[in-house]
Structures are given as C-alpha cells and as structure tokens.
Image (cartoon, rainbow, N blue to C red):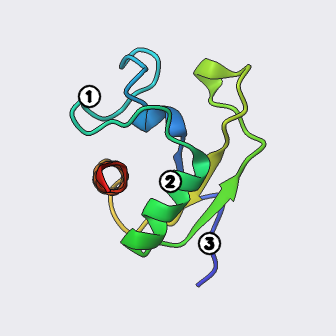
Amino acid sequence: MPLDEEKAWVLWPEYFDSDRTRAEGRRVSKAVAVSSPTLDMIVVALKRIGVEHKAEADRAYPGNWHEHKGRVLVEKKMTKTKLIAAVAEQLKKAQRS
C-alpha cells in the first residue's frame, strides 16, 4: 500500500538529538538520544523496523527553521510514541556498533 502523505507521522532529526533540550524539540530521554542524528540514520532505522516511509531532505523543523536537516514521513502502523521509541532504540544500537 502506498504511503498516504496526508495522514503520515512526521519524524524530525531533532526528536532524537541529545544536544537539544526538550524545549528545543527532543522527544526522547537523553539516555536513548544520539548526538547529531542525520536523516539517513533515521531512514536506516525505519528500514530495520520495517515501516514504509519517505524522506524529504529539503524540510526544516519549525523550531529550528534556519537549518534544513529534513524530515521523514512514516506510515501509521503504530502510535507515534511507540514509533519514536523504536527509532530511538535502533539509532542507539547503530551508534554502539
């Protein structure tokens, strides 16, 4: 089934960045956050999880509008909270290896 971009979850690299505060957009605890996550790292994590997604490199997080780090649209197979936790876990595993 193709990704419905109008109904997809949006994931920003800022959600997983240990260098940011919660007020600056981090959505995961410092314990599972990684330093300077990239769009490519998030795409690899989503492939490991097995969810359909689409990366958009030309987008900027509203709270960080001057840096175009991109975003990923993800199909709604699970709640956004569970999706963010699963991606964070995959990013942390990739950082360790």
Kindly report the distance in space between the C-alpha atoms of the residues bearing marks 1 and 2.
17 Å
x, y (%) of residue 6? 65, 58
Q: Let me know if residue 38 appears in the view.
A: yes
- Position of residue 52 in the picture relative to residue 48 (left or right): right
The residue at the point 34 percent across, 64 percent down is 78
Q: Quadrant of residue 4?
A: bottom right
Kindly report the distance in space between the C-alpha atoms of the residues bearing marks 3 and 1.
31 Å
Q: Which mark is residue 56?
A: none
Q: Let me know if residue 9 appears in the view.
A: no
Q: Tell me the residue that label 1 is attached to.
A: 30
Sequence order check, earlier mark of 2 and 3: 3
Q: Which residue extends farthest right?
A: 58
Sequence order check, earlier mark of 3 and 1: 3
Q: Tell me the residue that label 2 is attached to.
A: 42
Q: Secondary structure at mark 1?
A: loop
Q: Secondary structure at mark 3?
A: loop
Whether 31 is drawn above or below 78: the answer is above
Marks 3, 1: nearer the viewer: 1
The residue at the point 70 percent across, 25 percent down is 67
Q: Tell me the residue that label 3 is attached to.
A: 3
Whether 88 is drawn above or below 22: the answer is below
